């Protein structure tokens, strides 16, 4: 039953791709010898791919799928790095427009003076 469903899926996929040649394709797919040959060829392809991966692994060489996965990972890291660079550029622009270190130092001095005033007020309250 599952074999018939697989055949129907293959049949529909091939028919969709060839368009006007549908009747010819259907006639070929109805031919048991052709269907068997197609199934054998697809199975052989899968076995060849598996054998190639095994051989590449035995030689410690990456397979095409490994290289594709690595390329996707590198692209992902590249995009993330670009995002970090953009964030750093925005921070640099903000620092330049806000007066940079001078503004930060001035704010810190103001905070220190406020802390000293609070400490003096606390000392006055303790003495009282």
Image (cartoon, helix red, strand yellow):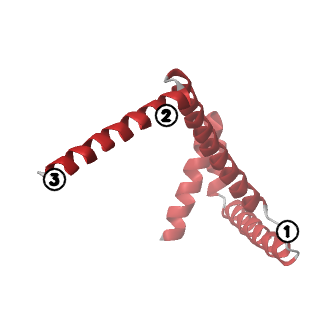
- Residue 81 in percent (x, y) is at 64, 44
Q: Residue furthest left?
A: 128
Q: Does residue 22 appear in the picture of this structure?
A: no
- Residue 94 in percent (x, y) is at 51, 27
Disc 1 packing (10 Å; few <14; some 14–19; many ≥20) = few
Residue 127 marker: 3
Which residue corresponds to the image point at 78% horizontal and 59% vertical from the top-left?
Answer: 64
State the residue in front, 117 or 46: 117
State the residue in front, 22 or 27: 22
Mark pair 3, 1: CA separation: 81 Å
Q: Name the residue beneath numbered marker 2.
A: 105
* Lower position in the chain sequence, tag 2 or tag 3: 2
State the residue in front, 110 or 58: 110
SS type, badge 1: loop
Q: Quick check: 108 above or below 27?
A: above
Q: Residue furthest front?
A: 127
Circles 3 and 1: CB distance less than 8 Å?
no
Q: Residue furthest right?
A: 59
SS type, badge 2: helix
Which residue corresponds to the image point at 57% horizontal and 61% vertical from the top-left?
Answer: 7
């Amino acid at each position: 039953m599952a074999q018939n469903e697989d055949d129907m899926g293959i049949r529909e996929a091939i028919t969709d791709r060839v368009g006007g040649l549908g009747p010819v394709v259907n006639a070929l797919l109805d031919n048991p010898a052709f269907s068997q040959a197609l199934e054998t060829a697809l199975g052989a392809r899968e076995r060849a791919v598996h054998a190639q991966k095994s051989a590449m692994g035995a030689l410690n060489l990456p397979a095409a799928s490994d290289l594709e996965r690595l390329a996707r990972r590198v692209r992902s890291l590249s995009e993330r790095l670009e995002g970090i660079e953009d964030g750093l550029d925005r921070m640099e622009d903000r620092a330049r427009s806000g007066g940079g270190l001078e503004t930060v130092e001035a704010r810190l001095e103001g905070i220190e003076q406020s802390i000293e005033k609070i400490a003096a007020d606390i000392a006055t309250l303790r003495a009282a």
